[in-house]
Amino acid sequence: MIIAVPYENKQVYQHFGKTETFKIYEASDGRIAAEEILSTNGHGHGELVGILKERRVSVVICGGIGTGAQNSLTQNGIQFFGGVIGEADKAVEDYLLNQLKYDSNVKCDHHHEEGHHEKGHAHSCTSH
């Protein structure tokens, strides 16, 4: 099984579509067998799922994730578990032990231009 986590400074990065790196885990017999850091090479929202599919990822553990990315992952047969906070390694270990705390209703919506946060416009990567 191949698991991907949007990754920054050992933590689950909280915006799937803007991640610069994924930590890729290969799991076998309920344990992490191998891991590597994968750069997204500046690719954003639309291309990330293609990168993961190419790497044969079957599970994504993430923080905030928009509905477009959620739909794309699902359409490509990749399960996702959003709303996860904390260390990436621990999140994967918890997933493998069926103890991962996640939010099935997580969403990440932006009401502004990419990369710009304006006064009065909320950046919302939340779970409800």
Image (cartoon, helix red, strand yellow):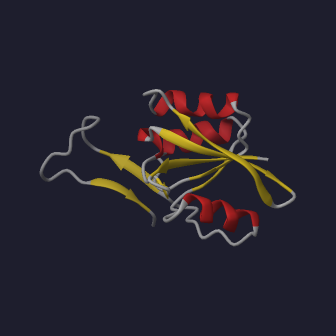
10 relative position to 92: left or right:
left
Relative image position of residue 8 (x, y in whole percent): 45, 50
Relative image position of residue 41 (x, y in whole percent): 47, 27
Relative to 107, does residue 75 appear above or below in the rendering?
A: above
Of the pair 48 and 72, the residue shown nearer to us = 48
Of the pair 9 and 84, the residue shown nearer to us = 9
Which quadrant of the structure image shows residue 73?
A: top right
For this orientation, the residue located farthest to the left is 119
Q: In which quarter of the image is the C terminus?
A: bottom left
Tell me what residue is drawn at x 66 percent, y 42 percent: 74
Relative to 31, does residue 3 appear above or below in the rendering?
A: above
How many numbered dots are placed on residues in this image?
Answer: 0
Tell me what residue is drawn at x 25 percent, y 35 percent: 113
Relative image position of residue 65 (x, y in whole percent): 48, 49
Of the pair 108 and 100, the residue shown nearer to us = 100
71 relative position to 53: left or right:
left
Tell me what residue is drawn at x 69 percent, y 43 percent: 78
Tell me what residue is drawn at x 45 percent, y 41 percent: 19
Which quadrant of the structure image shows residue 70?
A: top right
For this orientation, the residue located farthest to the right is 29
Relative image position of residue 44 (x, y in whole percent): 44, 31
Relative to 29, does residue 37 appear above or below in the rendering?
A: above
